[in-house]
Image: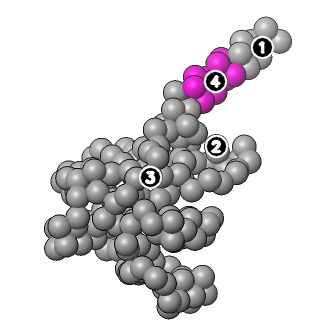
Amino acid sequence: MARVVRVLVVVVLLVAAVTAAGWPVYVAPQHDRPRPADAILVLGGAHDGREEFGLDLARQGYAPRVLLSDPYGPHSKLMNRLCNAQYSFEVTCFDPSPRTTRGEARYLEAQARAHGWNRVIVVTFAPHISRARYIIERCFPGELMMVENPTRHNAFYWTYMYLYQTVGYVKAVLQTGC
């Protein structure tokens, strides 16, 4: 019985340590207050409202254009609706290559270089902000404002995100260049 208690204590301490270490990276990452920018880049992922959030930032006047990552293919009703709607600002939908944050960063870098952009707002969700910043900064030399799309999630989701984002960080660190 004493051995079982010791194992449980070690497990609880390990979970607490991992949670504490990941908290500032995944749960409460450094995010920025949006300021006027050359463009808004909305990263792909779950359709959790981030696309509409990015469009709302443009409606509020933060940037004259929005880049919507669209790695979903032609059957995404949401992206078809958003990409084909009329706006008072420019909206560009693009399929990143590769279909990852790295592909989105490469697309942003090419557009920024072609159009002389120096400041970009990036919209994603909290667990992805730190890793996305790390990846995009490798490609885009200008100022990034990482903005969190406000969402709520359960404990299972956060556990999954800790694992998924950690693996993604390892992959990003092992990759070189943009």
Binning the other alpha carbons within 10 Å of mark 2 as few (below 14), some (14 to 19) or many (20 upward) gives few
- Which element type, helix, strand or loop, lies under badge 3? loop
Q: What residue type is labelled 2?
A: Thr
Binning the other alpha carbons within 10 Å of mark 1 as few (below 14), some (14 to 19) or many (20 upward) gives few
**Residue most toward the right?**
1
Q: Residue at x 69, y 22 (%)?
A: 12
Q: What residue type is labelled 4?
A: Ala
Residues at badges 1 and 4 in contact (C-beta under 8 Å)?
Answer: no
Q: Which of marks 3 and 4 is in front?
A: 3
Q: Which residue is tagged 4?
A: 16
- Which element type, helix, strand or loop, lies under badge 4? helix
Q: Which residue is tagged 1?
A: 5
Say which quarter of the image contains residue 170: top left
Q: Which residue is tagged 3?
A: 34
| Image: magenta residue range | 10-20
- Which element type, helix, strand or loop, lies under badge 1? helix
Q: Nearer the viewer, mark 2 or mark 1?
A: 2
User: Can the viewer see residue 44 in this picture?
Assistant: no
- Relative placement, left or right, of 8 versus 106 is right
* Residue 111 in magenta stretch: no
Q: Which residue is drawn at 51% across and 32% down?
A: 24
**Mark with earlier residue (1, 4):** 1
- Relative placement, left or right, of 140 versus 102 is left
Where's residue 153, x and y in %?
Answer: 70, 50
**Quadrant of the drawing holding the C terminus:** bottom left
Disc number placed over residue 159 in the picture, else none: 2
Q: Which residue is drawn at 28% across and 70% down?
A: 107
Where's residue 176, x and y in %?
Answer: 20, 51
**Mark with earlier residue (3, 4):** 4
